Amino acid sequence: MTTPLTVHQKWERTKRWLRRRFTPPGPVRIRLVCGLHNCAVTCESENAYRHRLDSFPEYFHVQVRKEQSHTSKIDSLLHEWAHVLTWCGLDDDPHGEEWGLAHSRIYRAWCDWDYGQKKKLKDIEE
Ligand SMILES: [Zn+2]
C-alpha cells in the first residue's frame, strides 16, 4: 500500500504534469500569492518586448490565491493553464470557445490522471 500524497505533493505533481502533458507556448512562472483579489490570474511578463504582432510573451505569470482550499487551487491552476495555452489564439473572448475547449481537455485529462496514482490496467489484471 502506498502512502497518500500530501496536498503539497499533489500541487507540485500537478504543475509538473501540466508542463509535460500540455506544453505551454512559452515559459510559465506559477506562484501562490497571498491576498489576491481573484482566485487566480494570468498575465504576460511586464517587460515583454514584442517584435512582431504574432510573437509570444517572454514568459507567462500565473498567480493563484494562497488562501483557498487545495481543490480550488487546482481548479484555478487548470483554468489559468487553459488561458496560457490559448493566450495568442484568435478568440477575442478570454473564456470563449478556444479557451473552453482547452479547459475541457485539460480537466478531463487531469481527472483521468489522478496525480499519477491510478493503477494501470496491466497491474489490475495481474
Ligand atoms: Zn479565466
Image (cartoon, grey):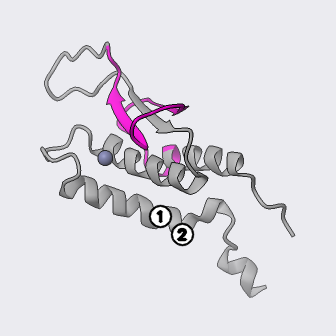
What's the distance in space between the residues labelled 2 and 1, CA to CA?
Answer: 5 Å
Query: What span is colored magenta in the figure?
Result: 19-46
Does 76 appear in magenta?
no
Q: Amino acid at mark 2?
A: Asp
Ligand 1 contact, mark 2 (Cβ < 8 Å) = no
| Closer-to-camera residue (39/58) | 39
Q: Is residue 2 above or below residue 82?
A: below
Binning the other alpha carbons within 10 Å of mark 2 as few (below 14), some (14 to 19) or many (20 upward) gives few
- Residue 61 in the figure: left or right of residue 56: right
Tell me the tag on residue 42. none
Q: Is residue 112 above or below residue 19?
A: below
Q: Where's the N terminus, which quadrant?
A: bottom right
Picture residue at 79% right of the left edge, 85% below the top: 126
Picture residue at 32% right of the left edge, 56% below the top: 102
Q: Is residue 110 above or below residue 41?
A: below
Question: What residue is pinned by disc 1?
Answer: 109
Q: Residue furthest bottom?
A: 125
Q: Position of residue 34 (x, y in %)?
A: 54, 31
Tag 1 secondary structure: helix
| Mark 2 and mark 1 residues within 8 Å of each other at the beta carbon | yes
Q: Amino acid at mark 1?
A: Ala
- Quadrant assignment, res 52: top left
Picture residue at 51% right of the left edge, 61% below the top: 110
Binning the other alpha carbons within 10 Å of mark 1 as few (below 14), some (14 to 19) or many (20 upward) gives some
| Closer-to-camera residue (77/14) | 77
Tell me the tag on residue 112. 2
Q: Residue furthest right?
A: 1
Q: Is residue 39 above or below residue 123?
A: above
Tag 2 secondary structure: helix
- Residue 121 in the figure: left or right of residue 20: right
Q: Position of residue 70 (x, y in %)?
A: 60, 52
